[in-house]
Amino acid sequence: MAEAQSLWIAIAAAIQTQRDRPSLIQHAQPVGGGCINRSYRLLLDDGSAWFVKLNQLDCLTAFEAEAEALTAIAVSQTIRVPTPIAWGEADRTAYLVLEWLDLDRGPSDWQQLGADLARLHRQTHSAQGFGWHRDNVIGQTPQINHWQRNWGEFWQTQRIQFQLDLAAQKGYRWPNAKALCDRIPEILTDHQPQPVLVHGDLWSGNAGFLADGTPVIFDPATYYGDREVDLAMTELFGGFPSAFYDGYRQAWPIDAGYRRRRDLYNLYHVLNHVNLFGGGYAQQAQRLIDRLLQIR
């Protein structure tokens, strides 16, 4: 859809406020890469370029949460993320403005991406336990992040049970899902991870590289959780190159038992895909549930 000129004028004014310099629009070019938001490369008269996401007005809280997540990751000084510049509403539209980064036009240093992710995990901790200071979204689905001390209970109630309840509302049910959900604290009982800042939605579509090979991650669904949730998701949709895992392990070895927990962590994302897209993801969820119930 074509965007109103008044919207672009308001966005340019918001950028100008943050940069304290005049900002006139030269061009707004639609860009692909996502199915949730309308995205643009906004070029200003001073030659600067910005990445702009647009959506319905009720998505403003999601944009605010994304900006806060990117800022939290940036503050750690461990891994590159696009800097959030401005967010707000104009012309009955929610917007988020990020720094424009030219990605994937040079070498891809996957080993460095693994090392940088390990640094993010090692250098961020929460004394409040697992969760975050606010809820956010995973894709378009609400993600609940209430603080909780017990990791198994957090994963059971705020991740798997929450997605199962949403799925039931959409008509998706698995006969043995309750049995699995009841067992989650038991499956995780001997695993006592430290709460670290996780990306939360780390698949290949949410990572890229600058021209010099510097890794970048974006579109986070951040909270404080078990670092293994990020590693697990990198294996869900095709997997990252082996160099990524080499880089991570060299910076921070992966705990014994990770393979046992990987399916449980990825079940969350598969259930979310059931709720977002339906289709074959329901069968994939059933296979994961069956496999997890075989764990003794």
Image (tube, grey):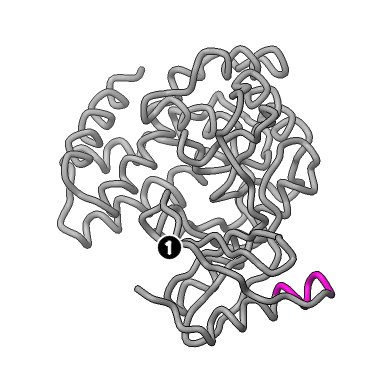
Q: Nearer the viewer, residue 62 or 44?
A: 44
The quarter of the image holding the N terminus is bottom left
Mark 1 nearby-residue class (10 Å; few <14, some 14–19, many ≥20): some
Q: Nearer the viewer, residue 238 or 137?
A: 238
- When the figure is inspected, residue 13 is found, relative to residue 101, above or below; the finding is below
Three-letter amino acid code at disc 1? Asn
What x and y, as percent, mark residue 15? 71, 72
- When the figure is inspected, residue 233 is found, relative to residue 63, above or below; the finding is above
Q: Residue at x 20, y 37 (%)?
A: 176
Secondary structure at badge 1 equals: loop
Magenta-span inclusion, residue 159? no
Stretch in magenta: 15-20
The quarter of the image holding the C terminus is top left
Q: Is residue 253 left or right of residue 182?
A: right
- When the figure is inspected, residue 117 is found, relative to residue 259, above or below; the finding is below
Q: Residue at x 34, y 48 (%)?
A: 272
Q: Quadrant of residue 47?
A: bottom right
Label 1, on which residue?
37
- When the figure is inspected, residue 248 is found, relative to residue 68, above or below; the finding is above
What x and y, as percent, mark residue 256? 56, 13
What x and y, as percent, mark residue 281? 22, 40
- Considering every residue shown, the one lying at the far right of the view is 20
Q: Main secondary structure of the magenta part?
A: helix
Q: Nearer the viewer, residue 202 or 107?
A: 107
Q: Is residue 287 left or right of residue 206?
A: left
What x and y, as percent, mark residue 62? 52, 66
Q: Residue at x 46, y 79 (%)?
A: 57
Q: Residue at x 58, y 46 (%)?
A: 218
